[in-house]
């Protein structure tokens, strides 16, 4: 079976040499849509310019958007929690791992995988009654902002995204310094 390049040389690559322009009837005779497009692209500068312009416009239009542009997708629940490094219990708007996934537009298993691979720092907040680990609203706000910025140019998040991970860890650490320092960081 001949490759596409071999087929094009067999079907008359001399027609695509510089200077040749097929007539409209020759183009219409070609039954294969893609073959017709390739011939026009190779021989018609105006057609080529239109295709390139359309391709560039599509590429440059900011095709990636983030669902986190406006912040987290859901609010948390006010819970009485304990924070590592802080002796007293405080009430904060917090998220369990499942709720964190919902707030960031991911599933629980993705959040767990991010925690295991080091994309997200492990939570330092535990619910006082159940002991479940939690993230506070302020931590998720900075994580959502970092992910939204990242998603403007890529839809994938992995442990290879060092710049994103460093940003997330730095911002979360700043929030945690405020929490441990005694400020509640609660908006209400």
Image: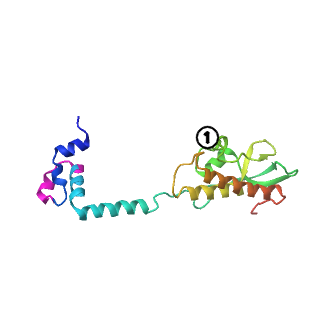
Colour scheme in the image?
Answer: rainbow
Q: Residue drawn at (43%, 63%), measured in percent from left and top?
A: 61
Q: Determine which quarter of the picture holds residue 37.
A: bottom left
Quadrant of the image for the C terminus? bottom right
Q: Is residue 1 visible?
A: yes
Pick whichever, 81 or 44, lies toward us: 44
Q: Does the magenta segment cover residue 23? A: yes
Q: Determine which quarter of the picture holds residue 159.
A: top right
Q: Is residue 103 visible?
A: no
Q: Residue drawn at (19%, 55%), measured in percent from left and top?
A: 17
Q: Is residue 108 left or right of residue 15?
A: right
Quadrant of the image for the N terminus? top left
Pick whichever, 43 or 116, lies toward us: 43
11 relative to 53, above or below: above
61 relative to 39, above or below: below
Q: Position of residue 135 (x, y in %)?
A: 72, 50
Q: Is residue 80 left or right of residue 138?
A: right
> Around disc 1, counting alpha carbons within 10 Å, would you say few (fewer than 14), some (14 to 19), or many (20 or more)?
few
Pick whichever, 135 or 159, lies toward us: 159
Number of disc labels: 1
Q: Residue furthest right?
A: 87
**Residue corresponding to mark 1:** 109
Q: Does the magenta segment cover residue 41? A: no
Q: Position of residue 131 (x, y in %)?
A: 78, 41
Q: Residue drawn at (24%, 53%), measured in percent from left and top?
A: 38
Pick whichever, 20 or 63, lies toward us: 20
Q: Position of residue 54 (x, y in %)?
A: 34, 62
Secondary structure beneath dot 1 equals helix
Query: Magenta span covers which residues?
Result: 21-34
């Amino acid at each position: 079976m001949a490759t596409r390049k071999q087929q094009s040389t067999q079907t008359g690559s001399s027609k695509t040499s510089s200077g040749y322009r097929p007539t409209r009837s020759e183009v219409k005779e070609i039954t294969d849509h893609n073959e017709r497009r390739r011939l026009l692209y190779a021989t018609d500068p105006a057609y080529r310019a239109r295709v390139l312009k359309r391709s560039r416009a599509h590429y440059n239009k900011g095709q990636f958007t983030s669902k986190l542009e406006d912040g987290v997708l859901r609010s948390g629940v006010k819970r009485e929690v304990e924070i590592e490094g802080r002796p007293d219990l405080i009430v904060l708007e917090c998220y369990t791992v499942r709720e964190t996934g919902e707030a960031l537009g991911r599933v629980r298993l993705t959040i767990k995988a991010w925690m295991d691979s080091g994309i997200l720092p492990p939570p330092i907040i535990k619910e006082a009654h159940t002991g479940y680990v939690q993230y506070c609203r302020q931590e998720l706000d900075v994580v959502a902002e970092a992910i939204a910025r990242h998603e403007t140019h890529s839809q994938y998040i992995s442990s290879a995204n060092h710049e994103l991970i460093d940003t997330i860890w730095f911002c979360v650490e700043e929030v945690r310094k405020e929490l441990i320092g005694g400020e509640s960081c609660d908006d209400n």
